[in-house]
Image (spheres, rainbow, N blue to C red):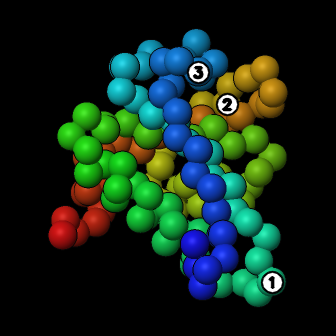
């Protein structure tokens, strides 16, 4: 929420229980995510990046959270650029039942290596 307005929804899922788990070797606690931003009346520069950072800080605060995957559509260049700016590494393109996706990964260690621990 921002100024009492819904601004996003973050969908977190266990990779092993999802179709993505058929494409990669994963551990039981590996997570995937989808970020859905609400259309805004006016743009807030850097907001999506700040949301991603806050979410990853929260997720990686759990000791069992070690790997976070994202798989935007290969044509969603804005999402791919955002993931790279947030420290995700591109792994490969994969074919899911609903889309051709670019698979990205960030580990807990990678996340904390670029951010101060508070």
Q: How many marks?
A: 3
Report which residue position mark 2 lands on. 93
51 on left or right of 111:
right
78 on left or right of 41:
left
N-term-proximal mark, 3 vs 1: 3
Disc 1 crowd rating (10 Å Cα; few below 14, some 14-19, many 20+) is few
Question: Does residue 63 sit above or below 58 in this rendering?
Answer: above
| C-beta proximity under 8 Å, tags 3 and 1 | no
Of discs 2 and 3, which sits in the foreground? Answer: 3
Tell me the element at label 3.
Answer: loop
Residue 94: percent from left, percent from top: 68, 25
Residue 62: percent from left, percent from top: 26, 44
N-term-proximal mark, 2 vs 1: 1
CA separation, marks 2 and 3?
A: 17 Å
CA separation, marks 2 and 1?
A: 33 Å
Tell me the element at label 2.
Answer: strand
CA separation, marks 3 and 1?
A: 34 Å
**Is 45 or 29 nearer to us in this picture?**
29
Question: Does residue 33 sit above or below 95 in this rendering?
Answer: below
Tell me the element at label 1.
Answer: loop
Question: Does residue 18 sit above or below 88 in this rendering?
Answer: above
Q: Is residue 23 visible?
A: no
Residue at 60 percent of width and 85 percent of height = 3
Of discs 2 and 1, which sits in the foreground? Answer: 1
Residue 18: image tag: 3
| C-beta proximity under 8 Å, tags 2 and 3 | no
Disc 3 crowd rating (10 Å Cα; few below 14, some 14-19, many 20+) is few
Report which residue position mark 1 lands on. 41
N-term-proximal mark, 2 vs 3: 3
Residue at 31 percent of width and 38 percent of height = 65
**Is 14 or 26 nearer to us in this picture?**
14
From the image, which quarter does the C terminus lie in? bottom left
């Amino acid at each position: 929420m921002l100024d009492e307005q819904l601004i996003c929804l973050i969908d977190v899922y266990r990779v092993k229980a999802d179709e993505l788990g058929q494409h990669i070797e994963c551990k039981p606690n590996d997570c995937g995510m989808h970020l859905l931003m609400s259309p805004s009346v006016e743009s807030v520069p850097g907001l999506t990046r700040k949301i991603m950072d806050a979410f990853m800080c929260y997720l990686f605060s759990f000791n069992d959270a070690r790997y976070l995957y994202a798989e935007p559509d290969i044509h969603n260049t804005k999402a791919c650029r955002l993931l790279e700016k947030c420290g995700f590494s591109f792994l490969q393109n994969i074919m899911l039942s609903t889309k051709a996706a670019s698979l990205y990964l960030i580990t807990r260690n990678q996340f904390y290596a670029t951010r101060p621990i508070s």
